[in-house]
Amino acid sequence: MNFDFDKTEKTLRDKINGLFDPDSKAALANLENGDIDEVREATLNCSKILGQAGYMALGLDDGKNGASLTATQESLAVVSPSLFLSVEVSARVFGRLVAVYGTPDQEEKILLPMKEGLLIGTVAISEGGMNIENDPLDTAGVSSDDGFRVSGSKGHVVNGPIADWIAVAGKVGDEIGFFLIKKDSEGMSIGQRLTTLGYNGVTISAVTLENCHVPSTYIIGPFEGEEQLKTVRRWEDQALTAASLGQIQRSFDTALNYAKNHKSGGKPIIAYQEVGFKLAEMLTLLQTAQLLAYRAAWMADTGDREAAVLAHCAKVFCTESSEKVASYALQILGGQGYISGNPAEEGYRESKYLQIAGTSSEISRMKIADNVLMSQ
Ligand SMILES: Cc1cc2nc3c(=O)[nH]c(=O)nc-3n(C[C@H](O)[C@H](O)[C@H](O)COP(=O)(O)OP(=O)(O)OC[C@H]3O[C@@H](n4cnc5c(N)ncnc54)[C@H](O)[C@@H]3O)c2cc1C
């Protein structure tokens, strides 16, 4: 097996950090303090830069993950976790939904500008008491006026306050479709921006629909069964796994730098074995998480029977490792680590989202266990 990336893959991966000019970097650093308009502007500016570099379109035309996509995503997640989450929900989840299941007209009107970073999208699936595994959707559309009237409510939607388009999952009779709803559509209200433990540069809100009219040309599906819903969740899981790799790298880099430069008892703290052992453990987790995530992404493209279970293993391991590595990093930074605003402390908070969102650690483990039982 060849574990190396080819030259084009390496070039894109290496250039992500250098893509952003000082103004964009300053806007990124300020995402957490910005109001909604400022966050939208900074997200769009960076999306345009990423669009020109070809990043936004990765994995959209062929629908494939690939180890190289994961490694490139990891590079962006190192630069800015919040920008990463916002861009990935827009491109790799919303964008893929339109690319893989949408009509040519939807592609032209929505996907093309999204690939250039000119618009922001999101997908609203989860509801109060529903998850894909064990409860039906309450949101539903009924036929009316050459389209549908959609009603329902979604509790948490990444990019909700800044999105140009929201793909809302809902029932159509016994089938499931995604209603593509433009911002400011009558009948759709976006809730207040929610305050969250981490990813504070991402805008998140509830979305409520009350008899919202969606033309028949703006539905994806409807489909029998839940396969498409589950596919969207797999894309989300893949992006969250890549987010973890970026988090681990950020925490490790921060701790290593601090351990080399911060002195205690007259010597850099890296000289103390207890600190060195923590760094060794962090690097081991980073290397292992990368291998597992890349392999899971590579296997997803082979259609192998084990691909789905490996993706769950990767999400559990990588997202939980990101919490462990952030915790070690925070400890190495000592009092400095406990002060808000350093990558270790941010990673510690953000890792909880990675374990809850998409397929949660608990549900992932159940799926892994089910697969083990079935294969015996
Ligand atoms: C900040 C934020 C942003 C989000 N953005 C979006 C978005 O953009 N779009 C979107 O659609 N959703 C979004 N979500 C929703 C997110 O996907 C869900 O929160 C997540 O899937 C978990 O569902 P839940 O909150 O309903 O928890 P529940 O499903 O109620 O689970 C609660 C607990 O019970 C466990 N549990 C539940 N069912 C089982 C089971 N069958 N077996 C074992 N354990 C189980 C869970 O693992 C968890 O620990 C967001 C959530 C947050 C917090």
Image (cartoon, rainbow, N blue to C red):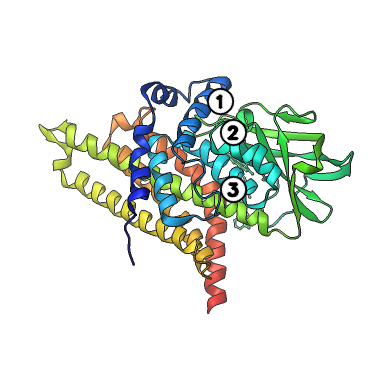
Q: CA distance from mark 2 to mark 3?
A: 13 Å
Check if mark 1's residue and mark 3's residue have beta carbons within 8 Å.
Answer: no
Q: Amino acid at mark 3?
A: Arg
Residue 218 position (above or below residue 229) = above
Whichever of callouts 2 and 3 sits on the residue coming sooner in the sequence is: 3
* Mark 2 vs 3: CB contact within 8 A: no
* Image position, residue 164 (x, y; %): 65, 31
Tell me whether the residue at label 2 lies in contact with that at label 1, contact meaning CB atoms closer than 8 angstroms.
yes
Which label was assigned to residue 40? 1
> At 82% across and 35% down in the image, what residue appears?
213
> 324 above or below 112?
below
User: Which residue sits at x=25%, y=47%?
Assistant: 279
Label 2 vs 1, first from the N-terminus: 1
Residue drawn at point x = 78 percent, y = 47 percent: 138
- The label shown at residue 96 is 3
Residue at which label 2 appears: 120
Q: Residues within 10 Å of mark 2 (few under 14, many from 20)?
A: many
In the rendered image of this protein, does residue 6 appear above or below residue 24?
A: below
171 over 41 or under it: above or below: below
Q: CA distance from mark 1 to mark 3?
A: 21 Å
Residue closest to the far right: 145
